[in-house]
């Protein structure tokens, strides 16, 4: 990954894309995060492959098909150069790599780390299956246009052993992370580290796995040949992943060489942090390896300021670059002599330490990345160089009939199909379907991006109000005026499998740019760059569909959810248990799987930010937070029609005296109980005023509903109108004096805007969201008692009588078309309000 970051960081005018294998889903988010500061998200793509089996042969049908499909996926990106960071993987995991299996014209570069198994087949290629796999990769390596060796020696090996032309080989060298550096420890920190590893005196250190090539046994023998007085002053620390049997074998060897029990310390499992600390604290680092492609441990130790000595073989001298600190790793006497000088000669030891950091600075990932880019440029320029083609004599005119026209995408696809035919048929229907699905998922050319709108609840039941009104209104606007270059598609959650389908059947029912008559509700087909907008509220099921969202996001689907309010988590007592209990999991899920969350007001988004800050959200990347305002033109939301038989008589009663209107479902949080109690006080004091409540009974109001129905003022000065159509409500607005919103919590406050449209004055509780919507165009009150509200109503009536009450005229409001435009500006144009970063809360 360090090389890929360096290439990206130094790309200059070049465009870098990263392609990831979807058979490694857990790594996608990590890699996206690692490159989030360098690449736009749409330049990290995930390609699909058919499912594979482990320990498969190089000629296995699945393997060969997967290699071809991978090359097809990369060809669809139309790259100038493809760089393979690791060619030899794939025998015991789902890695798939190949070179020029289908598309020989694509320039391909490979990083080569070493040829150790190839040069030592008796040690590393004893398993017949792995041998075939490895040698197959060697043949692929020979087809590479560019070979990036991590050392000069590595490149020389490839030229000599594989007959690869030198002009195709570039030494890009290697480097270490910036984490490997000199660190000053306090005495307490130093003692704690040493004690944890059982180190009681200055120590000589080495690292490496337990295998013959690492020559740990040779180091033990050489160390045992040091003078007794030196061995008594030092300990030998081997940081090595050793099994119990290997540890026992190494200890027995040390004992047979006369080493005391405490002279050899084995540390099998060490964190990166501890490894860096040990590099800093060791007196001498010894690297006795027989064969390396580079020699990274030596460079890590040098970067930490350690005195380093090592083998004079293969690539190691390129790293250490000091003749007097090298030894023949097969000559234990010579190894002991170099170690003895470093331990006994203080001036030599100091010079080694001084040179170490200077030498380490000559290796950097930026330099390595620049060398790789230069190699890509040279190969590309060579490929593009014009070739002179001699022309023959002009012949008589001839007629050419073009019988078949194919786009570049068609050519790529047809080439893939021909290649797949060449390896025979799949072994079964499952393999065939898996292959077909992977091919379809990788097709990119000429496809219009899709904007999926979640209508899961709306398509099952349209409540004609609340969230369903918002969903319906925004959907209609997006269908009638889709974003330029986008295809808007309604989508619904299939609750039986917790995955999304197209909502084509519902689409046909609303009659706006509908789906084709034969389009069924197939599974949603998303690709890189598509967008999912969770407009409907499906709080009970979204947590169960978390895996679907995670998989889709890894493949490049941008996911955004609309948040209407946070009242069920702020005030769970206001809601039924079924709603209050499902809301926290819903919030956690959408905060985890989304690219952004969009409140229906700034106040909602501010609440959302506070909630995210105080809850443990598991994500690596930042989370975009935005908001938009709802529209208020009822005609654009397919208003309901119909007037009851007694409508005119009721309207006449409302007109007969000052009437205060409340609009919204009767729920505990809406303030109806406080309002009725306040009006009872007004009536008792002789104030002639009506209270009209428009809204159906909601949850937890059974007893209050009876109070309203049986109230002595019911039908006289108290009116509860249920099941009111938009048409009837419009007449009610025209008959009343003002709107009262006594709600203790809202996500937006649409009735305020509807009242302003009618020119009605507004009396409202002083909430941030109401201030956001109404600004100075409303009369505000505070407090929860009936007396407080009664006094506020009395004050407003007095101000209104003398023309000094705030007026709603001039209050800004949006049409649904403008509301939809605000969503587009957030989701498509990236006009976000805030960005939440996990580190801000210590994640």
Image (cartoon, rainbow, N blue to C red):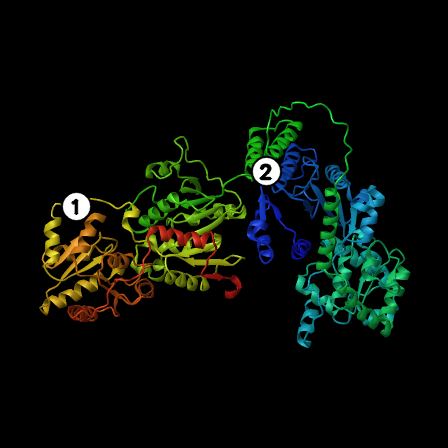
Closer to the camera in the image, 774 or 183: 774
Name the residue tied to disc 1. 643
Which image quadrant for residue 779?
bottom left
Quick check: 485 left or right of 275?
Answer: left
Q: What x and y, as percent, mark residue 15?
A: 63, 50
Q: Residues within 10 Å of mark 1 (few under 14, many from 20)?
A: some
Under circle 2, the secondary element is loop
Q: Earlier in the sequence, mark 2 or mark 1?
A: 2
Q: What x and y, as percent, mark residue 210?
A: 76, 54
Closer to the camera in the image, 423 or 630: 630
Q: Residues within 10 Å of mark 2 (few under 14, many from 20)?
A: some
The residue at the far bottom in this view is: 187
Closer to the camera in the image, 36 or 49: 36
**Residue pictured at 35% horizontal, 62% vertical:** 570
Name the residue tied to disc 2. 51
Is residue 834 in view?
A: yes
Quick check: 24 left or right of 298?
Answer: left
Which image quadrant for residue 420?
top right
Q: What x and y, as percent, mark residue 685?
A: 10, 70
Under circle 1, the secondary element is loop
Q: Quadrant of the N terminus?
A: bottom right
**Residue pictured at 30% horizontal, 47% vertical:** 637
**Residue pictured at 74% horizontal, 71% vertical:** 200
């Amino acid at each position: 990954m360090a090389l890929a970051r360096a290439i990206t960081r130094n790309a200059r005018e070049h465009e870098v894309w990263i392609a990831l294998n979807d058979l490694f889903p857990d790594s996608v988010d990590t890699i996206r995060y690692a490159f989030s500061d360098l690449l736009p998200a749409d330049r990290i793509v995930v390609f699909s492959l058919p499912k594979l089996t482990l320990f498969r042969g190089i000629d296995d049908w699945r393997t060969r098909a997967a290699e071809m499909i991978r090359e097809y996926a990369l060809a669809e990106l139309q790259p100038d150069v493809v760089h393979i960071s690791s060619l030899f993987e794939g025998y015991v995991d789902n890695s798939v790599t190949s070179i020029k299996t289908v598309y020989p014209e694509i320039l391909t570069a490979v990083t080569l780390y070493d040829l150790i198994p190839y040069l030592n087949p008796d040690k590393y290629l004893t398993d017949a299956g792995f041998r075939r796999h490895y040698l197959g990769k060697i043949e692929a390596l020979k087809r590479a246009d560019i070979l990036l060796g991590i050392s000069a020696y590595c490149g020389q090996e490839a030229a000599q052993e594989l007959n690869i032309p030198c002009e195709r080989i570039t030494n890009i060298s290697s480097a270490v992370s910036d984490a490997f550096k000199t660190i000053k420890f306090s005495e307490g920190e130093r003692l704690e580290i040493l004690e944890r590893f059982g180190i009681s005196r200055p120590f000589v250190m080495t690292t490496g796995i337990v295998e013959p090539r690492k020559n740990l046994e040779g180091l033990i023998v050489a160390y045992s040949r040091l003078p007794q007085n030196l061995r008594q002053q030092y300990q030998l620390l081997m940081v090595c992943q050793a099994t119990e049997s290997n540890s026992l074998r190494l200890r027995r060897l040390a004992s047979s060489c006369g080493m005391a029990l405490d002279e050899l310390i084995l540390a099998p499992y060490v964190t990166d942090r501890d490894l860096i600390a040990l590099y800093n604290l060791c007196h001498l680092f010894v690297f006795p390896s027989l064969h390396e492609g580079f020699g990274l441990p030596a460079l890590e130790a040098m970067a930490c300021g350690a005195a380093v000595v090592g083998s004079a073989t293969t690539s190691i001298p390129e790293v250490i670059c000091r003749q007097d600190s090298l030894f023949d790793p097969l000559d234990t006497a010579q190894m002991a002599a170099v170690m003895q000088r470093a331990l006994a000669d203080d001036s030599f030891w100091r010079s080694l330490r001084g040179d170490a950091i200077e030498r380490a600075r000559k290796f950097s990932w930026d330099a390595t990345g620049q060398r790789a880019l230069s190699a890509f440029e040279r190969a590309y320029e060579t490929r593009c160089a014009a070739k002179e083609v001699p022309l023959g004599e002009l012949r008589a005119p001839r007629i050419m009939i073009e019988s078949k026209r194919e786009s570049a995408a068609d050519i790529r696809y047809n080439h893939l199909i021909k290649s797949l035919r060449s390896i025979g048929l799949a072994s079964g229907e499952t393999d065939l379907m898996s292959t077909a699905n992977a091919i379809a998922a990788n097709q990119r050319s000429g496809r219009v991006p899709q904007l999926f709108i979640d209508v899961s609840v709306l398509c099952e039941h349209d409540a004609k109000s609340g969230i369903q009104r918002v969903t319906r209104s925004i959907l209609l606007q997006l269908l009638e005026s889709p974003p330029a270059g986008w295809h808007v598609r309604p989508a619904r959650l299939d609750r039986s499998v917790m995955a999304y389908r197209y909502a084509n059947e519902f689409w046909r029912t609303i009659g706006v740019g509908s789906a084709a008559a034969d389009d069924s509700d197939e599974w949603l087909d998303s690709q890189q760059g598509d967008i999912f907008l969770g407009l409907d509220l499906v709080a009970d099921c979204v947590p169960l569909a978390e895996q679907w969202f995670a998989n889709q996001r890894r493949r490049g689907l941008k996911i955004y959810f609309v948040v209407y309010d946070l009242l069920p988590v702020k005030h769970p007592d206001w809601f039924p248990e079924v709603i209050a209990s499902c809301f926290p999991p819903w919030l956690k899920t959408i905060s985890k799987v989304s690219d952004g969350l969009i409140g229906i007001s700034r106040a909602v988004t501010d609440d959302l930010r506070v909630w995210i800050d105080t809850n443990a959200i598991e994500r690596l990347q930042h989370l975009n937070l935005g908001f938009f305002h709802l529209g208020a033109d009822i005609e654009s939301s397919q208003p309901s029609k119909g007037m009851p038989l007694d409508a005119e008589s009721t309207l006449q009663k409302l007109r007969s005296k000052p009437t205060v209107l409340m609009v919204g479902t009767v729920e505990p949080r809406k303030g109806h109980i406080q309002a009725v109690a306040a009006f009872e006080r007004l009536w008792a004091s002789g104030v002639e005023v009506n209270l009209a409540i428009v809204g159906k009974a909601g949850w937890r109001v059974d007893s209050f509903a009876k109070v309203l129905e049986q109230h002595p003022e019911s039908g006289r000065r108290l009116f509860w109108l249920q099941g009111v159509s938009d048409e009837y409500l419009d007449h009610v607005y025209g008959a009343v004096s003002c709107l009262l919103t006594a709600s203790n919590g809202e996500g937006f406050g649409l009735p305020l805007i509807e009242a302003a449209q009618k020119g009605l004055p507004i009396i409202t509780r002083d909430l941030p969201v109401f201030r956001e919507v109404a600004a100075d165009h409303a009369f505000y009150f505070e407090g929860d008692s009936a007396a407080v509200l009664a006094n506020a109503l009395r004050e407003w009536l007095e101000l209104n009588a003398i023309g000094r009450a705030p007026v709603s005229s001039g209050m800004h409001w949006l049409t649904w078309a403008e509301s939809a435009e605000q969503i587009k500006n957030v989701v498509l144009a990236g006009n976000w309000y805030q960005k939440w970063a996990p580190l801000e809360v210590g994640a």
